[in-house]
Amino acid sequence: MLNEVYLGLGSNLGDRRRNIEEGVDRLREISTDIAVSSFYETAPVGLTIQPTFVNAACRIWTKLTVFELLETLQGIQGKAHAHRAVLNGPRALDIDILLYGNLVIDLPHLRVPHPRITEREFVLRPLAEIAPTVIHPVVNRRISELLAGLER
């Protein structure tokens, strides 16, 4: 069975766009179909004394379970030398599971949908570009509506 998954990608070290492109190339290996948003340059959130980010979102169709996907994404990030010395600090590549179908998981090591998706424009803007009508399974609103709520 194929699962529709939305991922957020970000980079603020090295060749940021190339880091994301290489991450997307690796995602093609686990996906039967992939759609990628435009790239957006964004200011850091939280720890603001760091380089600006390039962010994107993508949709994949994969046979991987959510736990297999998490492990695979961690491997992709590791290959990109994406070790973070500081939580929310600079990184070559960050890939977050934003939505995994209508699945809702709340575990210490995995929360789906991503817990801060509804409050982060740098996530919602690229996601709304490729999935404006997708419904957030917890707040039951379209991605485009969530983005419009932030823009007010």
Image (cartoon, helix red, strand yellow):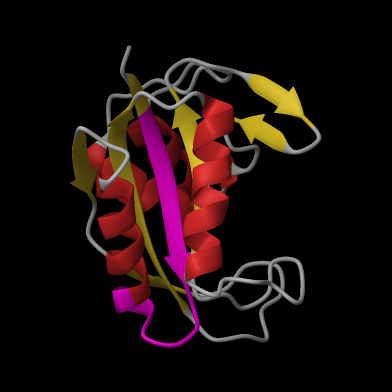
- Asked if the magenta segment contains residue 13, the reply would be yes
Q: Position of residue 103 (x, y in %)?
A: 53, 16
**Tag count in the figure?**
0
Please give the name of the residue rendered at 47% of the width and 30% of the height, measured from the top-left corner.
99
Q: In the rendered view of the protein, which quadrant contains the N terminus?
A: top left
Which image quadrant for residue 41? bottom left
Residue 62 lies, with reference to residue 148, above or below; the image says above
Instruction: Inspect this view and state whether residue 137 appears.
Output: yes
Instruction: Inspect this view and state whether residue 152 appears.
Output: no
Residue 7 lies, with reference to residue 33, above or below; the image says below
Judge by depth and name the residue closer to the eye, 30 or 125. 30
Residue 137 lies, with reference to residue 121, above or below; the image says above
Which image quadrant for residue 146? top left
Judge by depth and name the residue closer to the eye, 35 or 130. 35
Residue 2 lies left or right of residue 87; in this view the side is left
Q: Position of residue 58 (x, y in %)?
A: 31, 46
Q: Position of residue 45 (x, y in %)?
A: 62, 67
Residue found at the far top of this picture: 1
Please give the name of the residue rendered at 50% of the width and 84% of the height, measured from the top-left corner.
13
Please give the name of the residue rendered at 70% of the width and 67% of the height, measured from the top-left corner.
46
Judge by depth and name the residue closer to the eye, 26 or 124. 26
Q: Position of residue 93 (x, y in %)?
A: 49, 68
Residue found at the far right of this picture: 108
Which image quadrant for residue 143? top left
Please give the name of the residue rendered at 52% of the width and 62% of the height, measured from the top-left corner.
77
Please provide the residue range marked out in magenta: 5-18
